[in-house]
Amino acid sequence: MIVIGGGPAGYTAALYAARAGLSAVVLEKLAAGGQMAQTLQIDNYPGFDAGIDGLTLGEQMRKGAERFGARTISAQVDAVSLDGAVKSVRAGSEEILGRTVVIATGATHRALGLENESALVGRGVGYCAACDGMLYRNKTVAVIGGGNSAAADALLLSRICARVIVVHRRDQLRATKVYHEPLMRAENVEFRWNRVVEALVAGEDGRLAALKLRDVQTGEISIERVDGAFISIGRAPETKLFAGALELDGSGYIVADETTRTALPGVFAVGDVRTKPVRQIVTAVADGATAVHFAEEYLAAQGA
Ligand code: NAP
């Protein structure tokens, strides 16, 4: 079994496969844990009464799978061939063959798409408050977005920064209720409702200095001076490699139901990369276990 991606879904598939006596290899380009590794505190993954940080949890998931013989290769996958009984995955000069492939590539942050956005990354613009929030101790930062990630980022930053300005394009948060009260109570969190970022204004030092905001109802333009801005407007699935080979939905997610089976026999999609209503660590690990169940069924039918 070739598992592409070493997040919670990928390492759970590897653990279940290895325990079922399959030969499992995980291809991971960065660190074990995937997106989860960027989360400082995880409180909604059961079994950790004081919560746990994502990097540690990712490492523990890797070690747990490797204890039963799963292997990890640190490599970026360049190409895949998913048809037929023997599938192949190419990473650099290496070609790995497998009877089953589990796609666990997850998703990455979405960008605003503003002209100088990529030039300002690391110079005031960031996508991971848990990673870079400490750089803005006692400073003023903005969080763009109104979902769970934006709300969690704003809360985290409110404990570090002097001021946190939440910029959201609607007049209320999309985030679940659990975030509302602490955010409204935090004295250093301000909201700019119905606003979108029209431009990122750089200072003479080449760093972000301010945001140019537009009120979506009145068209009014305002300037917000900030030291940093965290863009938290959702994620896009990592599915470029599979376009053409597999069916993707309108947002680019791999079409697969609760069995995690894709349209191609022996190919499974697990975790955030799959079409699903709830993208959480617990649902990702559930997918990993489910994929191995149906992979075993597939292999048995093949007589493998
Ligand atoms: P999300 O739920 O899709 O929210 C994205 C937010 O960004 C929305 O408020 C959206 O506005 C806004 N947005 C999107 N494009 C924008 C643009 N171009 N300009 C300005 N604003 C824009 O994404 P997410 O918060 O990253 O969460 C992703 C998934 O992870 C969700 O399923 C979420 O529940 C889950 N998650 C869960 C937790 C947890 O604790 N439980 C924590 C983090 C993430 P609109 O509201 O107007 O659409």
Image: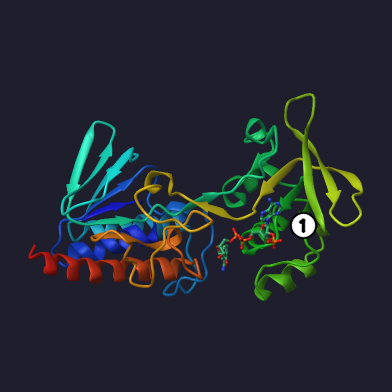
Residue 273 relative to residue 191: left or right:
left
Q: Height in image: 205 above or below 143?
A: above
Q: Quadrant of the C terminus?
A: bottom left
Residue 294 relative to residue 192: left or right:
left
Secondary structure of the residue carrying numbered label 1:
loop
Q: How many marks?
A: 1
Image x and y of residue 287, in percent = 36, 68
Residue type pointed to by label 1: Arg
Residue 212 relative to residue 1: left or right:
right
Furthest residue in direction top, as rendered: 204
Residue closest to the eye, 221 or 67: 221
Q: Height in image: 127 above or below 175?
A: above
- The residue at which mark 1 appears reads as 169
Image x and y of residue 141, in percent = 75, 47
Which image quadrant is residue 55 in? bottom left
Identity of the residue drawn at 47% across and 64% down: 52
Q: Height in image: 205 above or below 157?
A: above
Which image quadrant is residue 217 in? bottom right
Q: Quadrant of ligand 1?
A: bottom right
Residue closest to the eye, 101 or 66: 101
Image x and y of residue 236, in percent = 53, 52
Disc 1 CB within 8 Å of nearest ligand 1 atom: yes
Residue closest to the eye, 13 or 190: 13
Instruction: Name the colouring of the figure.
Output: rainbow
Q: Quadrant of the N terminus?
A: bottom left
